[in-house]
Image: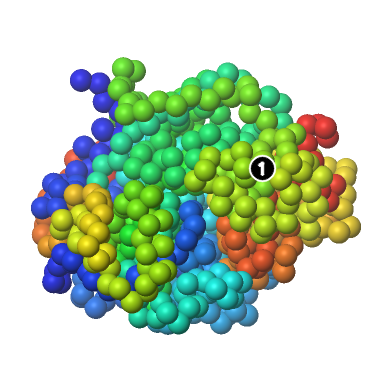
Amino acid sequence: MTESGRRQIAGRGIPVPGNDIDTDRIIPARFLKTVTNEGLGLHAFEDARKHDPEHPFNQKVYEGASVLVAGLNFGCGSSREHAPESLKQWGIKAIVGGSFAEIFFGNCTMLGIPCMSVDNEDVLWLQRAIGRDPRQPVTVDVEKQEVRVGDRVIKGRIPDGARNQLVSGAWNATGVLLEAGDAIEATAKRLPYVSGF
Amino acid sequence: MASSLLDKVWEAHTVRTLPSGQTQLLIGLHLIHEVTSPQAFQALREMKVPVRMPERTFATLDHIIPTTAPQARPFADAVAEEMTVHLTRNAEQSRVPFFDLTSGRQGIVHVIGPELGLTQPGMTIACGDSHTATHGAVGAIAFGIGTSQVRDVLATQCLAMAKPKLRQVRVDGTLAKGVYAKDVILAIIRALGVNGGVGYAYEYAGDVVDRMTMEERLTLCNMSIEGGARFGYVNPDQTTFDYLRGRQYAPQGAAFDRAVTWWKGVASDADTRYDDVKRLDGGAIPPMVTWGINPGQSVGVGERIPNPETAPELERATYREGLAHMGFEAGQPIAGAKIDVVFIGSCTNSRISDLRVAAAVAKGRRVAKTVRAIVVPGSQLVAREAEAEGLHEVFREAGFEWRNAGCSMCLGMNDDKLRGREMSASTSNRNFIGRQGSPTGRTLLMSPAMAAAAAVNGAVTDVREMM
């Protein structure tokens, strides 16, 4: 169940300015009316893009970008994994942000998308740097917990558990969890609400 | 050493420590619905892995179903029908109990869990929905998960989780008349911020919480995620036990008394040490109304909408964006803001006590001519109870539509949506841009009493003037 690890991701950047960008903004609920994940990438930021022609996801210069740079509390709100899935299908492979909402962070990890937190000043610097030169590569080094652009090295943070999962390629947890075998049922049986009060 | 409910429940459900350093945490109750489960069941089919503990898994329909009568199948909305077919088939094939429309038990997943007694103290509870912390009101560790984690729980009854830190949020004093659990949680989010709870579980405590009914605690815990906290709970006490006694899935007879003994034991010890403690004066909380585009952007009904220049620097841009989207001016009183739509419902505020409060305000009054107002009970059981009390007639006579149970206009996945720039007074939990189904729609979050008052006056009104 493991894939090759996500030690390091390099690609062009796309800045999404602003704090508290919620998952309804990333993908409006009407696109969750589906039983598959097909085509979700087409609807990433759909309403925000319609509302704002200058939205980064509308700009040709950011086509092909794979490192999204966001502000604080990115991905707050709903637990819909459709949100990171839509970004992934659009081409996003890593997200650098001031901070992340917890469920969104977990969902990204489960899809093999590292979310690296950096200081907010660094977010603003990165967003400006990418805006000035959208073609320059941005490297998200998961193992070393840093972001590199040109000769600048920015200190980042990914909590140990998620980082270990990403680096080892074990972000699809099902296989690892199944390895516990009968210990799962044994744990359940010790709980009086399972075994009967 | 003293330990908290979080410590005790976490330890009791720990299967092992994973190579990543995370805990393999057993999930005692898994609740599923039609929106976040189909891809997970598909993944199980592809892996050829069965549902590990179908007897600890329960399904219902809530997000996409129409709330207008008759809810005849097939639904007019072909995609809603398809999602229903998938859930029905997945539940049947995996022998997962399913509270469908014909069960008499269908409803919003966070309403039916507690009301059926599925939700119990000391459990770990997961659901593919961010409002799962609702169930923490009975003293459970309950949290929202994404679809890949739904897959993990279906396949293994476990999750790979990092244990959160614990913050006690104390609300002491006495709430003023006309102030409800919804106002308390909006005040907490305003004080601690929409991301203040990231990395934390919130243990709600204090005089106000101690005196709350179970339904009030459900409202309180429901919006933990709006404050950034994935988990929120209240220690189980006599209120909890009285609420659970006699419910369908609660232990019965002598087993109930044995359960109470165990439940008392999972509560946080008196000398528990918290990573952080925050305090609010309950007596100072007014009826709250949001003015912006996240649930932290709120004011007391008597206050003016704040000026972005006075906001913390990092929040100024979001303040400006909020004002622009809502069409409000800084300094404008929130009272008097014109309302087009009133929605009373959602996993936050659709229980019988919410409907009673709203009906008491609506009784003998009329919804303003310019307002369309709907009341959507949280479950079929809530609907039957309300109808037995005649609340549906009170609402209808006042000019509200009385609907069937579902998530409805909280997120507009069925036909219940705002149109264009309509302004909604809503008892739901999110005022995000586009949340209620129209990309330009506007949402003001408030309590059921305040929403009923807004319906009558066609504008935001201090409900205390009508009591």
Residue B131 position in % (x across, y down): 47, 50
Instruction: Identify the residue at image location x=57%, y=22%.
Output: B281
Q: Quadrant of the C terminus of chain B?
A: top right
- In front here: A141 or B254? A141
Instruction: Identify the residue at image location x=56%, y=29%.
Output: B212
Residue B213 position in % (x across, y down): 56, 31
Q: Is residue B163 left or right of B295 when viewed as pictured?
A: left
* Amino acid type at image mark 1: Asn
Instruction: Identify the residue at image location x=41%, y=40%.
Output: B197
Give the tally of numbered discs.
1
Compared to residue A21, the image places residue A136 above or below, namely: below
Compared to residue B214, the image places residue B1 above or below, namely: above
Q: Is residue B251 left or right of A3 when viewed as pictured?
A: right
Compared to residue B274, the image places residue B117 above or below, namely: below
- In front here: B32 or B284? B284
Residue under pointer 1: B307
